[in-house]
Image: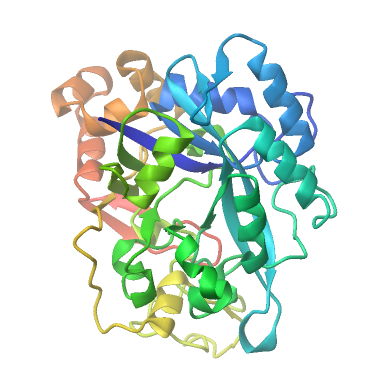
Amino acid sequence: MEEIFADLHVHIGRSENGKPIKITAAKSLNFANIAKECADRKGINVVGIIDCASPYVIEDIEEFLKTGDAYEIEDGGIIYKDKVCILLGSEVETSEKGRNGKCGAAHNICFFPHLKDIKNFSQEMSKHIKNITLSTQRSDISGYELIDIVERYNGILIPAHCFTPFKSYYGNCTDRLKDVFKEKYEKIFAIELGLSSDTELADMISELENKNFVTNSDAHSLPKIAREYNKMLVQDISFKEIVKALKGEEGRKILCNYGLDPKLGKYHRTFCDNCNQVIQTKEPVVNCPHCGSAKVTFGVFDRINLIKDKNKSISPKSRPPYIYQVPLTFIPGLGKKTIDKLLDNFGTEMTILHKLDKDDIEAVVGEKIANEIILAREGKIKIDSGGGGNYGKITTQ
């Protein structure tokens, strides 16, 4: 068995020939660059690229496999330079009934073992999505229907960023995931927490006790890859092994969830759209306490506190720890040149964040920045909560 790092939610901004895939993602974020970034700079062993159902991306993958640097394996996935396993995925937006009779939308990340599987899935979904070439376009089916299609092509489905106010199940569709998936609920073996929540918050909801949690970056640019990630115990890097780890089968498992403190997330607390204030009250509010407006974007913290069915967070014994991890790009004083200097000396971001002593870091970038990195690693930071689409901010103590 080996310990590996996995980020299972990375977008593609453009195809190799410049065709738009994820409009809001960086142009440099293409299939080949993601593989290189994970192998050479991030130190991520498994990456889930979730725009692979676009026909333009499928063409890129086929060309990528011709380079000789990558190859498909029988147990699923594409191996790049024997360093990284790429899981072929698709983020699908489903149409749900929503709360109070309103139409809701939720995102799902779906993964498939082989290129032929996601090709077939793409052809099937083109019947339900107007423009299959673009990322995360609204489909005309529900999650209840989608899971059958995913399984038909040997895939798995994970509800994405489950609590965010837009495009998530708990955020704008339902108080209980069971109400959406009904008798198929047991087919959901993992959920993605999202940047504004953590294990402690999610375990306020009892129906999630037997679900494993994953923490992923939802990266829209190369530097954002691995801002959240998972440490897993597997036999090797492949689709088959990752599925076993997500299910907790045959000794494979998630060892740790590494994620931002939820306060750093863009939607942690409720935000007033009228006076542009993040609302920091102890209890959830419907009206802004500053101006009285009802035009508020509910934060993840507040939403969970509204729908929770436990008085306190209790995690099952099998739940891995959630470790607050601050990526290098979030640490005050670390610009691109300094990060490049660290990477040139030490190889990958995972090495810097997990393995180096303070003295090693200090020898390259000086005492002040070395202290910042160690304080961030140890969780000794002060955070101003994010909300309304604005990230929280950190200052070292």
Instruction: Give how far across and how far down residue 90 sits, in percent.
Output: 64, 46
Q: For the image shown, how many numbered marks are present on the structure?
A: 0
Structure colour scheme: rainbow
Give residue 241's quadrant in the image: top left
Q: Quadrant of the N terminus?
A: top left
Residue drawn 45% across the image and 31% down it: 238
Q: Is residue 46 left or right of residue 9?
A: left
Q: Is residue 46 left or right of residue 17?
A: left
Q: Please tell me which residue lies in front, 248 or 358.
A: 248
Taking depth in this image into account, of 208 and 337 the one nearest to the observer is 208
* In the image: residue 384, left or right of residue 219: left
Tell me residue 79's x, y (percent): 50, 21
Report the front residue among 167 and 208: 208
Question: In the figure, 160 relative to 104: above or below?
Answer: above
Which residue is the extreme one toward the top? Answer: 68
Q: Residue at x 36, y 57 (%)?
A: 212
Looking at the image, is 81 positioned above or below residue 292? above
**354 lies left or right of 236:** left
Whether residue 75 is visible = yes
- Residue under the image location 43 percent in, 23 percent down: 41
Q: Position of residue 125 (x, y in %)?
A: 76, 51
Q: Which image quarter: residue 269?
A: bottom left
* Vertical position of residue 172 compared to residue 359: above or below: below
Give x and y (percent) for residue 145. 67, 65
Query: In the rendered image, is residue 337 in sight?
Result: no
